[in-house]
Amino acid sequence: MEIWLMAGPLPGAGMFRVVLQRLNAGERREWLHPEAPGWAEAAARLAGQLALRPRTVLVAHGLAVPVAIAAARLSPPARLVLSNGPISRLDPVTAALSRMAAPGGRLLAQALRPALAIPLMASSAGFRRLVSNPYVMDRDTIATLCGAALAQPAWRRALVGFLQSLQTLPDPAGLACPVTLLWGDEDPLYPASEADYMDSLYGGGNHIRLPGAQHFHPEERPWAFADALRALPELQGMSERS
């Protein structure tokens, strides 16, 4: 059994670095690509990888959630784990960025340059609002998690293309794999009602709440996240690095 962890594109899958240390296993997956910027194209690429490795627990956080849902529809993994991302709707900030990206997104692509974007994300109006302890998301951490995705113009254009594609979301119903919702229940962007909605589609009992956790809980509470993953039926007995 394998476990793949996807996040982002902002922050990227580097957000799982401590989770992986705790699990002593797994793999971070960077899924956004300049040649496949939309969620449908990204999902098709991911589904091709899943088809070769069906014994995979696919974990997606944030804006990776729609990509994982669409990929699981094409190539069902052993289990799909979704965490604090868009299922039935976009959060207001991402929705505004998606509208900005729609006309072509040149201005948005310029605004995403690291010199402009990282200070904004590190400000009190940025990512610090999405954790319980604002000092977790300091400028150095944000540069580590987001710098690579913003450094190259081709990747910034891919991010703009992805945001544009989010004006429609994949249908979350009818997935042919077990689904678990691992959700920080104090997320101001994607509250627990998003997980409850998805849970209702699959008969209930699939929603694992992380009490008091906000949006970036894999960065802020990585051990709680890793331990919840290890308790899944497919991953019980996974070794632990203390």
Image (spheres, rainbow, N blue to C red):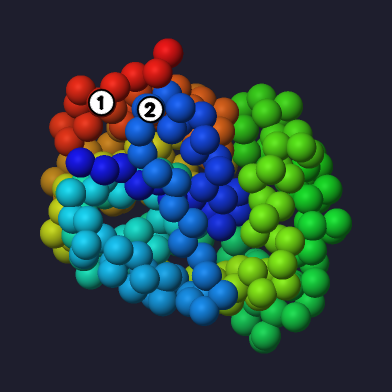
Whether the residues at callouts 2 and 1 have beta carbons within 8 Å, the answer is: yes
Percent coordinates x, y for residue 60 in the rendering: 40, 49
Percent coordinates x, y for residue 227 in the rendering: 35, 23
Q: Amino acid at mark 2?
A: Asn
Percent coordinates x, y for residue 222 in the rendering: 48, 27
Q: Total marks drawn?
A: 2
Element under disc 1: loop
Residue displayed at 67% across by 86% down = 103
* Residue positioned most to the top: 242
Nearer-N-terminus badge (2/1): 2
Residue that badge 2 annotates: 24
Element under disc 2: loop
Relative side of 191 to 78, left or right: right
Compared with residue 144, is residue 239 higher up or lower down, i.e. above or below? above
Residue displayed at 73% across by 45% down = 143
Quarter of image, res 129: top right
Percent coordinates x, y for residue 48 in the rendering: 28, 69
For the residue pair 207 and 115, the one nearer the viewer reads as 115
Quarter of image, res 214: top right
Compared with residue 86, is residue 126 higher up or lower down, i.e. above or below? above
Q: Amino acid at mark 1?
A: Met
Residue displayed at 46% across by 61% down = 31
Residue that badge 1 annotates: 238
Q: How busy is the neighbourhood of tag 2: few (under 14 within 10 Å), some, or many (20 plus)? A: some
Q: Is residue 174 in view from this perspective?
A: yes
Relative side of 104 to 240, left or right: right
